[in-house]
Image (tube, rainbow, N blue to C red):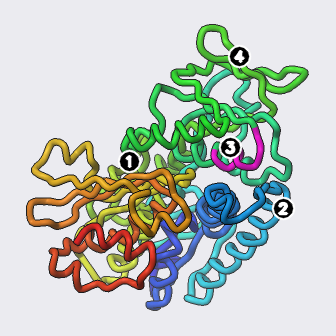
């Protein structure tokens, strides 16, 4: 009989945990999952799933706009109804995820968990011990350290707004800022984006980013580069955003979208002796911390890989294999694709055009509106860059278009599995389709 309450205890229940915790429990190991908030973590509840539901009518609106003449009438967005629809979509998810965990044999422990030593986590005064522990506490929104920061809101607040403010100020110009600016503008709000520097979406191909920004500007989104926000103050007619050289703009609502920070504090890492930095928890190539029985996965890690749901899912499932004895190999990350849900989207995977410029690669440029398939719904914007090595293996792709995420997803197997040209011809996609359109260009 084990000296511990659990074989493996997970701190957190997001994708960094549940994608592996359930399968691990199903092998017969005694697994516990500690969660103080909503089962499933950020992504299902107030991240990816909620965001894409809010974005759906924007896609419809843009298509109707492009095809005016073929169709007639403008599409408006009823924000209150949209948020209610979003809640109807995501409300069942915590119970569904929790149900799968418990059906697999895992135990859900509700409350805030904090290490008291390397094998023990206290949850609201009660201690639980485990032979091995996986930290999967994710990230939370960063907040600017300025006077009046309490007047700003975060992404979770934005997605819960039942009435859309008329004037919205967004601090930052990363994923969350650009996506929510797109949604709010499409629903009728006046949006100003206050940029930290003069570049938005720094991790993406800048010529594509600038075209998306130009379209957003044409639609009424204002961008303030190098804003240097100094304070937020309450005024009779709203909230003043103080920036630059004693400049200010008054809005009705402020979104602080200046990034996310790892939930590595307030969980007792020092008591367990776990090493961490401001970037997250430090792990080796087996996702093991400096304490041999403690592992970590998901966005809480300090890592070079993108902090995204597919990365967390991959790490969680890797730990399932490792902790169940099915592998002893180090983690071997695949190419992780990523997209920004603006309209048009920007998506990428693998080697970037910037990195390719310093190597022995062949770059192929395609103008999206030239593709007959994209002319069906009258796409007028978009480009992609396909990056091949000298053996015509696709090693990277980046695209901005209305369907960029689907295009890059289609190309993903070629990048991950290093298909040669003969193998590329072995896949016959349904025709006509976005997949056939994207795949045709790499053969």
Instruction: Kindly state the secondary structure of the residue where label 1 is placed.
Output: loop
Closest to the observer, 424 or 412: 424
Residue drawn at 44 percent across, 90 percent down: 27
Instruction: Kindly state the secondary structure of the residue where label 2 is placed.
Output: helix
Q: Is residue 265 above or below residue 242?
A: below
C-alpha separation, residue under disc 3 versus residue under disc 2:
21 Å
- Residue 275's tag is 1
Residue 359 in the image: state x and y as whole percent: 13, 47
Residue wearing tag 4? 248
> Which contiguous range is marked in magenta?
182-189
Residue wearing tag 2? 81
Instruction: Kindly state the secondary structure of the residue where label 3 is placed.
Output: loop
Which SS type dominates the magenta stretch? helix
Determine if residue 241 is in view: yes
The local crowd at label 3, few if under 14, some if 14 to 19, many if 20 or more residues have their Cα within 10 Å, is: some
Residue 381 in the image: state x and y as whole percent: 48, 50
């Amino acid at each position: 009989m084990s000296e511990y309450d659990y074989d493996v205890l997970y701190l957190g229940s997001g994708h960094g945990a549940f994608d592996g915790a359930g399968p691990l429990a199903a092998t017969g190991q005694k697994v516990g999952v500690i969660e103080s908030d909503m089962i499933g973590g950020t992504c299902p509840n107030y991240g990816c799933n909620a965001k894409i539901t809010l974005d759906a009518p924007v896609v419809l609106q843009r298509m109707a706009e492009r095809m005016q003449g073929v169709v007639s009438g403008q599409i408006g967005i009823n924000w209150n109804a949209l948020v209610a629809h979003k809640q109807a979509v995501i409300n069942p998810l915590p119970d569904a995820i929790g149900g799968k965990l418990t059906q697999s044999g895992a135990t859900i422990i509700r409350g805030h968990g904090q290490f008291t030593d390397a094998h023990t986590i206290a949850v609201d005064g009660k201690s639980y011990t485990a032979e091995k522990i996986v930290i999967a506490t994710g990230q939370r929104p960063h907040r600017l350290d300025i006077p009046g920061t309490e007047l700003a809101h975060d992404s979770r607040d934005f997605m819960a707004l039942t009435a859309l403010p008329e004037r919205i100020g967004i601090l930052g110009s990363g994923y969350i800022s650009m996506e929510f600016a797109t949604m709010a503008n499409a629903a009728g709000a006046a949006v100003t984006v206050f940029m930290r520097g003069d570049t938005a979406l720094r991790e993406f191909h800048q010529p594509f980013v600038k075209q998306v920004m130009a379209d957003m500007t044409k639609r009424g989104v204002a961008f303030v580069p190098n804003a240097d926000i100094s304070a937020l103050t309450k005024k009779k007619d709203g909230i003043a955003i103080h920036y630059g050289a004693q400049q200010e703009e008054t809005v009705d609502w402020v979104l602080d979208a200046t990034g996310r920070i790892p939930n590595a504090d307030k969980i007792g890492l020092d008591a367990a002796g776990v090493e961490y930095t401001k970037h997250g928890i430090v792990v080796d190539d087996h996702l093991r911390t400096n304490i041999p029985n403690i592992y970590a996965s998901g966005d809480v890690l300090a890592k070079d890989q993108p902090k995204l749901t597919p990365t967390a899912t991959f790490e969680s499932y890797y730990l399932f294999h490792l902790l169940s004895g099915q592998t002893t190999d180090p983690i071997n990350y695949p190419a992780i694709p990523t997209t920004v849900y603006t309209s048009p989207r920007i998506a990428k995977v693998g080697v970037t055009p910037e990195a390719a410029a310093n190597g022995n690669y062949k770059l192929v440029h395609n103008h999206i509106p030239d593709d007959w398939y994209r002319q069906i719904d009258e796409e007028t914007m978009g480009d992609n860059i396909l990056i091949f090595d000298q053996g015509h293996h696709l090693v990277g792709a980046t695209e901005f278009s209305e369907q960029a995420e689907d295009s890059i997803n289609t190309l993903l197997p070629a990048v991950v599995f290093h298909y040669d040209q003969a193998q590329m011809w072995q896949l016959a996609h349904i025709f006509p389709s976005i997949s056939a359109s994207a795949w045709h260009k790499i053969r």
